[in-house]
Amino acid sequence: MKTDKRITSFDDHLDEQYGKSGTESRDKFQEEFETYKIGVLIQEARKKQHLTQEQLAKKVGTTKNYISRIENNASDIRLSTLMRIIREGLGGSLKLSLDV
């Protein structure tokens, strides 16, 4: 069976684009990607509950602009604020894991 040398694994692609795991550029990419995923999860949960950004913002005492910035990965978010959005705004709970 022939293998196409142009096809690479996703890990190889990440190594090529952002450096090997443990390098500063790769760690920065991974951190930004995790922040992006949080924004997407909040947006999906909000939409599933048929809430607008403004409605969610009012439930948690913040602004539509702030919710938009979180969902679009343009804002750092404090853990306490994240928990309030999930608990009070979306009626959910936050589960974290730690890889050391």
Image (spheres, rainbow, N blue to C red):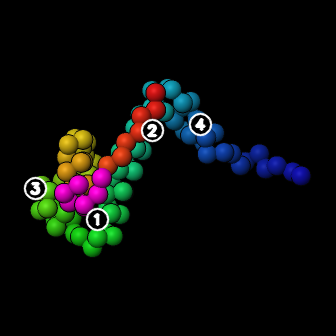
What residue would you read off at disc 4? 16
Hey, what amino acid is under mark 1?
A: Arg
As helix, strand or loop, the secondary structure at mark 2 comes to helix
As helix, strand or loop, the secondary structure at mark 4 comes to helix
Residue shown at 30%/53% (left/top)? 93
Give the x, y percent position of residue 57.
Answer: 15, 60
| Mark in front: 4 vs 2 | 2
Specify the segment rendered in magenta: 87-93
- The residue nearer to you, when weighing 81 against 39, is 81
* C-alpha distance separating marks 4 and 2: 14 Å
**In the displayed structure image, the side of residue 99 where residue 80 appears, left or right:** left
| Mark in front: 2 vs 1 | 1
Q: Are marks 3 and 1 in contact (CB under 8 Å)?
A: no
Q: For residue 46, which numbered disc appears in the image?
A: 1
* C-alpha distance separating marks 2 and 3: 30 Å
| Mark in front: 1 vs 4 | 1
Residue shown at 89%/52% (left/top)? 1
Residue 64 occupies which quadrant of the picture?
bottom left
Q: For residue 61, which numbered disc appears in the image?
A: 3
What residue would you read off at disc 2? 30
**In the displayed structure image, the side of residue 52 where residue 6 appears, left or right:** right
The answer to whether one can see residue 29 in this image is no
Crowd tier of the residue under label 4, counting other residues whose Cα lies within 10 Å: few below 14, some 14–19, many 20 or above? few
| Mark in front: 2 vs 3 | 3
Hey, what amino acid is under mark 3?
A: Gly
Hey, what amino acid is under mark 2?
A: Gln
Q: Are marks 1 and 4 in contact (CB under 8 Å)?
A: no
